[in-house]
Amino acid sequence: MEVNRPVQVVSPAPRDIWNAIVGASSEVWLSQTPAWLDCVCAVGGYEDASCLYEMSGNRYLVLPMARRHVPVSGQLIVESMPHGWGIGGPLAADPISVDDVALVWGDLINRAALYASIRPSPLCSDIWASTCPPQVRAATNSTHILDLSGGVDHVWEHRFKSTTRTKIRKAEHMGLRIECDSSTRLVPVFYDLYLQWVERRAREQGIPLWLARWRGKRWDPYNRIHSIVEHMGDACRVWVAWCDDRPAAAIITLFYKDKALFWRGTSDKELATGTRANDFLQWLAIQEACRAGCRHYGMGESGGVASLMRYKSGFGAVLYPYIDYNLGWFPTTEVSTCFQSALSVLK
């Protein structure tokens, strides 16, 4: 593959230049920032393996990336970003080009890593698909993203389905008490509600509760959620809808520049269905995103679950394909996929 060669490659990427690129980029997600990588390293057992590529003409490209050592072989796994830690891929002050992607692939192919993976933004999937080297494996996934252009009134009138608007109007008359906090105060409430959801699904599926709780905690550890909320500060919101003194639903959203993300959600099925608490929290978060000047509201993956896909499309969110790219023989993606499939019985 013929690529433009950088003048210099520095790893870890100097934080001052990385932060400057983040500040100038129109494509950045929160998971591509230095603060997010610090959280990955603090909680996930990774090391900072970010790379700064200095190009001719004083142009810089930064690749947020985490590194893990393989004890048996002494080799490395490098990921941008690790599974469960969001979107990765390179950033520049200007939009990423085909040449930028080809440069990154050329660098990763030449590394002595056991395994490398990249999960780029679904908003630039076409660029990545056109530059995928033959030795790289591609696993197609999808996510829902709501276009917030036109503002909150336009989104309400022209993007929400009428059935979604009806549910929200019903929720407004149910007397729900809403709390929203950027501290870790509501994280225990969120996590307790999540474990209740895990146990309810286990009973419905006839799965032992101890196994369901073990799977649930492995899939979404408390310390990861707590650490992200703690590290991200004002960029993170924990929302809880209370019905009397019981939490009916809770979500966690992330805000950065012009992009907002519905990152996690859980609920008490009986209370949430009766009060439409889930729909109401999404509506409040979307309003907050519009007020913050966000252009996109990511609603995450649905794992092919039809009911979740219908739910998200009711808010006007559009299905975007994206691809996980994997280089090397270590089956990280396959293992994660198998584990995700095992957990799907709980959903």
Image: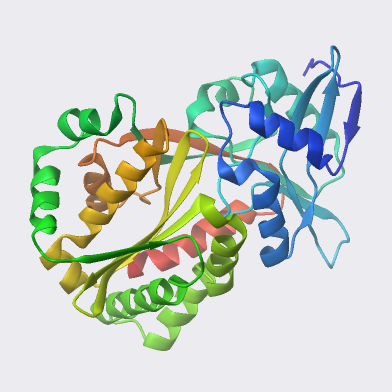
Residue reaching furthest top? 57
| Relative image position of residue 210 (x, y in whole percent) | 43, 87
* Colour scheme: rainbow
The answer to whether one can see residue 108 in this image is no
Residue 3 is left or right of residue 43, and the answer is right
| Relative image position of residue 83 (x, y in whole percent) | 59, 54
Task: Depth check: give the residue in front, 314 or 304.
Answer: 314
The answer to whether one can see residue 139 in this image is yes
Vertical placement of residue 203 versus 227, above or below = below
Vertical placement of residue 45 versus 8, above or below = below
Task: Depth check: give the residue in front, 267 or 3.
Answer: 267
What residue is rendered at 43% in x and 71% in y?
A: 186
Total marks placed: 0
Residue 91 is left or right of residue 181, and the answer is right
Task: Depth check: give the residue in front, 341 or 68.
Answer: 68
What residue is rendered at 78% in x and 43% in y?
A: 50
> Which quadrant of the view contains residue 135?
top right
> Quarter holding the N terminus?
top right
Vertical placement of residue 103 versus 284, above or below = above
What residue is rendered at 64% in x and 47% in y?
A: 81
Residue 69 is left or right of residue 147, and the answer is right
> Quarter holding the C terminus?
bottom left
| Relative image position of residue 86 (x, y in whole percent) | 55, 48
| Relative image position of residue 279 (x, y in whole percent) | 21, 53
What residue is rendered at 24% in x and 40% in y?
A: 313
